[in-house]
Image: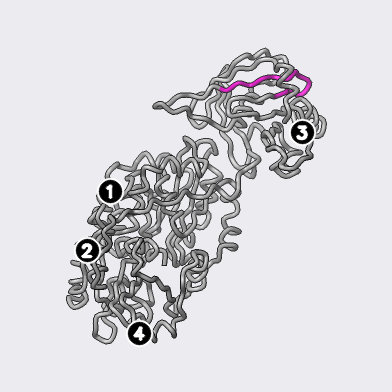
Amino acid sequence: MHRLLDVLPVFAGDERISRLFTLVPGSDFGVDALAALERLHARTVPWDEACRGQYDLIVAASPKGEIRLLRGPRVLLPHGAGYNKTVPGEGSADLASGLDPEYLLPGGGALATLHALAHPSQIARLTALSPRAAAHATVVGDPTLERILASLPLRGSYRAALGTGARKLIALTSTWGPESLLRLRPTLPADLAARLPQDAYQLALVVHPNQRSRIGDFDLAERLAPALDAGMILAGPHEEWAAVLAAADAVITDHGSTALYYAAALDGPILAAYDGRDELLPGSPMAELLARIPRLDHAADLEAALGRYQPGTGRAAAASAFAERGNALQRLSRELYRLLGLAPPAAPLTTRPLPAPAPPARTPSAFAVRVRIDGDEVQVERFPSHIDPPAHHLAAEHGAAGERHLQSAGLLYRREARPSTGPYGAAWTVAGWIAHALDSYPGCRTAAAVLSPGHCVAQIRHGALLTVRIESPLEDGRIVYTDPAAVLSAVHARLAAPDDGVAALTCVIGGRPYRVRLSPAAPEEAARPF
């Protein structure tokens, strides 16, 4: 269904076209498809009613089911990229359903008036299986890839929406079925979330819509809770997954075709997390890709595996899955309007960029912090609070973390509260809140107020209020900010006593140095509403 939505802009602005949706019976995933259409306020027609009608054009993304009962010219689009998988127990053994004559020639007649494919090699594969079905095939390209390519200039906006910053965004992709990443390696997202420093990496997960439908969004979120609690993004099944790919720095994939879109668009590092069983079709683009890229066996090996990726490997595999880059919508429009017997609108076709993705649903508020001190240089790595020791201290955000973490934290910090929207309110002063925190939590050694990305006020127990000024590094014309709370962990670790006399230090966070200057807090800082 989402594939169809990427195609429908070929009719944008044409008042002669009316769009109706119907669901072919027999799908295990129909409820979610109908729910998605309902959210879009699309017009739907019950199947029985659809079978009684006569249509000028029928567009489908799968040959399965009784599509032949719909009357009118039928156009079949690819479902995914590359025809890489076979589904055991469905159709002919060891054939991709999208190229299977059992589906394409029901009753001996051609199902599709037009079979729109993405690459000439797919016509060659189809010709070898059934020349009669291949006679109705033509290459138009892939409209979904067109949207990703058109959206690459928005990559920075997507990363800003996701809160990625200068961290590396690692996207995991899971297809559906018994050999998917989530079925064979269900703990990989949580394992990565527990091992990757929060200030150097961000995780995202792209799950095939069928897998989401089969599990259910609620149960899926519960299964993924450790990784989601650590800030992992669970990308939505329509448009958002593609925006996350456009924002990603690397991909970890099973044998699903999502990674091919990334390879075609960006050619960043791609790692294999597929155990190689029965579903992957030999000679397919994904088989070629998986044979050439590094394999990730354990979460701890991520950085080494990323370093083994050879640039260009993914792009070479994607070249056998996609053709007509930049022309797909135009070619498809020409074919569809030819079947309709209409002249296309005079206005030029434009590919719609992907909308910005949503930020992570959950943001971690307590961290197990590891530090390494070398004179006045302090390296900080923050991990989810549930990881096993050793850790130097626990840091927790007041107002977000639970009481158990607040009671155990060596560092408590609070971010500036949003102003009240009503006529009444109350606000701490900076000094007042810090004193309150140190008094309320005897186990806390340092309390701090985060006032801006470059300005905090902190106090070590029995010490004076300190101003913490953070100088962010400049890289290629960009100022790279970090979470000030990570800097506060460095200050907490370096100042073992209130009278240490340290005036400056260098915090290394996410591999970047941040110069930090400490000085007595001014009276106006202490009295600032907070």
Q: Helix or strand or loop: what does disc 2 sit on?
A: strand
**Which of the marked residues, 2 or 4, is nearer the chain's N terminus?**
4
Q: Is residue 304 above or below residue 183?
A: above
Q: Position of residue 255 (x, y in %)?
A: 37, 59
Q: Quadrant of the C terminus?
A: top right
Q: Helix or strand or loop: what does disc 4 sit on?
A: helix
Q: Is residue 12 rendered magenta in the image?
A: no
Q: Is residue 32 above or below residue 206?
A: below
**Which of the marked residues, 2 or 3, is nearer the chain's N terminus?**
2
Q: Are marks 1 and 3 in contact (CB under 8 Å)?
A: no
Q: Position of residue 328 (x, y in %)?
A: 26, 58
Q: Is residue 307 left or right of residue 501?
A: left
Foreground residue among 265 and 170: 265
- Which residue type carries mark 1? Arg
Residue labelled with disc 4: 69
Residue at 23%, 56% (x, y): give it: 323
Foreground residue among 74 and 362: 74
Q: Is residue 362 visible?
A: yes
User: What count of labels does the image hold?
Assistant: 4
Residue labelled with disc 3: 427
**Mark on residue 126?**
none
Give me the C-alpha separation between circle 1 and circle 2.
20 Å
Q: Helix or strand or loop: what does disc 3 sit on?
A: loop
Residue labelled with disc 2: 139
